[in-house]
Image: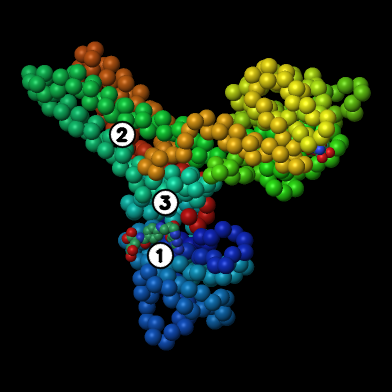
Amino acid sequence: MLDPRRSRDTIAAIATPPGDGGVGIVRISGDRSRAIAARIFRPARASFTEFIPYTLHYGRIVDGRDAVLDDVLVACMPGPGSYTGEDVVEINCHGGRAVLAAVLEEVLRCGARLAERGEFTYRAFMHGRLDLTQAEAVAEMIHAPTRSAAHLAQAKLSGLLGQRIAALRTRLEALRAALAVAVDFPDDEVECLPPEALAGGVAGVRVDIMDLLRAVDRTRTWREGALVVLAGRVNAGKSSLMNGLLGRTRAIVTDQPGTTRDYLEETVTLDGLSVRLVDTAGMRADTAAAPRIDAVEAAGMAMGRELMDRADLVLLLADGTAPLDSGTLSLATVLSPERTLAVLTRRDLPGFDPAHGAPLAGLGFELVEISSVTGHGLDTLCARVRERVLAGAGQPDPDELAPNARQAAILAEAAEELRQLEADALAAVPYDLLGVRLETACVTLSSITGEITSQEVLASIFDTFCIGK
Ligand SMILES: Nc1nc2c(c(=O)[nH]1)N(C=O)[C@@H](CNc1ccc(C(=O)N[C@@H](CCC(=O)O)C(=O)O)cc1)CN2
Ligand SMILES: Nc1nc2c(ncn2[C@@H]2O[C@H](COP(=O)(O)OP(=O)(O)OP(=O)(O)O)[C@@H](O)[C@H]2O)c(=O)[nH]1
Ligand SMILES: [Mg+2]
C-alpha cells in the first residue's frame, strides 16, 4: 500500500525488466538521491565536480570498501522538473540481474528505501506532474501489446483525456454558477437560466460523455487484444493449427486422440492486432469403445468449455476427411455462429471433402478450409479471424481517446446523474436540488483525473504497476 506518510523517503528500484539486458537502470528519487549517488559514484573525469542535469556522466559504482561493482553512466534530473517532481538519479548499469542487485543494494545501504509498485509514478501524480489519467496511461503504455494499443495509450499519456474531462467539468461548472445566481435571485429566475436551457446544456455534456463511452467498445479489441479459442473433437487438428499459426512447434501433436490435456496459450499479432490463441483439450464422450477419460482429461475439457464461453471467437475444428461426427455437431449446437468460425482440417489429404462441412454451414457457421501440413488456407483463416474479432471496428483514429474500465464506469455514473438532472429540470424540480445533482456530477467527473480521489482508489491503481515504475 502506498503510504503518504512515507512520501518523504528517498526511494530506489531497478527500473528495467528482470533478465539479461544490454543496459539496466537503477532509479533513485527523493531529496537524498544526489547525496547517495555522490557516495557510491566515482567519476572517470578529474574535471567532474557535480552532476550536470540531464547529462550522462561516466564512471564506476563502488561499494563501502571501494570495490568496483560496475562501470556505469549516471544521469541526474533535479526536481521539480523531473519525472517524479523530485531529485532523480538514474544509474545506467550493465543489464545483468546480479550487477543490478548489487548496485541497488549499495543505494539502499546508503539510505534509500526500496520503492513500492508504481511509487515513482505515484509521486509524479502527487507532485502534479501527471494527472490520474496520465498515470494510468503509463501502465497502459507499458502493457500495450501492439502499436495501435501504444498509440491509444500515448494520446492519454500526453494528457488529452484529462483535458477533455476538465473541459466537460468547466461546462458543468458554468451551469452551476448560473444556477447559483438563479437560486440567489429567484425573482429573476426565468431570465437567469430557464429550465430548458439548463437541460439543454446538461444534455450537451452528456452527449459528449456518451461519445467517449462509445470509444471504449470501439477500441477494446485494439487495446486488449482478442481471445481466440481452438475447440473441437479430439484429433480434429487443433494443436497442429496452433503450431501452424505460431510458426513453431509449441503444442504436442500426435495421432492419439486426447493428446492435449491442458490448455496452452500464446499471443500472436495479426497485422497489428494482438490475439491470445488458446489450444484446448479435445472433446470426446466416454463410450464403452473409447478409453476411459481420466480426471486430468475431464478437467482439461471443462477448462476448454470455460474458455469457449469467454472467447471473442471460437475456432471450431472438424476433420475434413470424414463425415461430421455427432460430437462436433453437438458442440456446434451450443456455440453461436456469431462468435464461431468453423475450420475444416486436413485439406491436403485425398479424402478431404468440403461437403463434410455442410451440416455446419447449414447451422449458419462460416467455414474455412485449411491444411496445417501444407499451410493452405492459413492466410485466409488469419484474415477472417482478424475481421471477425474486429467486427468492423477499424484502426482507431490517431486522436481517439479511449477511457479505461475505471474511467468508463465513472463516466457512465456521471452520464446517469446528468440524465436524471435533465428530467428533473424539465419537471420543475427546485433549483437548489438541481444544483446538488450538478455538483455530484462535477465531483464524479473530477475523480477521473484524480483531483478528488480516495486513498483506496489510488492504491488500487498504482498497485497494478511494476516495481520501478
Ligand atoms: N531513463 C529514463 N527513460 C524514460 C523515463 C525515465 O524516467 N527515465 N520515463 C519515465 O518513466 C519516460 C519518459 N518520461 C519522462 C518525463 C519527463 C521527464 C522530465 O525530466 N521532464 C522535464 C524535462 C526538462 C528538460 O527537458 O530539460 C520537464 O518536463 O520539465 C523525464 C522523463 C520514458 N523513458
Ligand atoms: N495431413 C494432415 N494431418 C493433420 C492435419 N492437422 C492435423 N493432422 C494430424 O492429425 C493428428 C491429430 O492432430 P492434433 O493437432 O494433435 O489434433 P488435436 O485436435 O490437437 O487433438 P487432441 O489434442 O487429441 O484433442 C496428428 O497426427 C496430426 O499430424 C492436417 O491439416 N493435415
Ligand atoms: Mg491437441
Q: CA distance from mark 1 to mark 2?
A: 34 Å
Residue where numbered disc 2 is placed = 443
Name the residue: 35% across, 59% down: 85
Expressed as whole percent of the image width and height from the top left, the position of residue 277 reads 65, 39
Secondary structure, mark 1, is strand
Residue where numbered disc 3 is placed = 122
Secondary structure, mark 2, is helix
Identify which residue, 90 or 180, lies in the foreground: 90
Furthest toward the left, the residue is: 187
The answer to which quarter of the image holds residue 188 is top left
Q: Point out the tag, 1 or 2, that comes first from the N-terminus.
A: 1
Name the residue: 49% across, 35% down: 220
Q: Point out the tag, 2 or 3, that comes first from the N-terminus.
A: 3
The answer to which quarter of the image holds residue 451 is top left
* Amino acid at dot 2: Val
Q: CA distance from mark 3 to mark 1?
A: 14 Å
* Amino acid at dot 1: Val
Residue where numbered disc 1 is placed = 88
Q: CA distance from mark 2 to mark 3?
A: 21 Å
Furthest toward the bottom, the residue is: 46
Number of residues whose C-alpha sits closer than 10 Å to that of mark 2, classed few (under 14), some (14–19) or many (20 or more): some
Asked if the residue at label 1 sits under 8 Å from ligand 1, the reply is yes
Identify which residue, 282 or 262, lies in the foreground: 282
Q: How is the image coloured?
A: rainbow
Q: Is residue 64 visible?
A: no
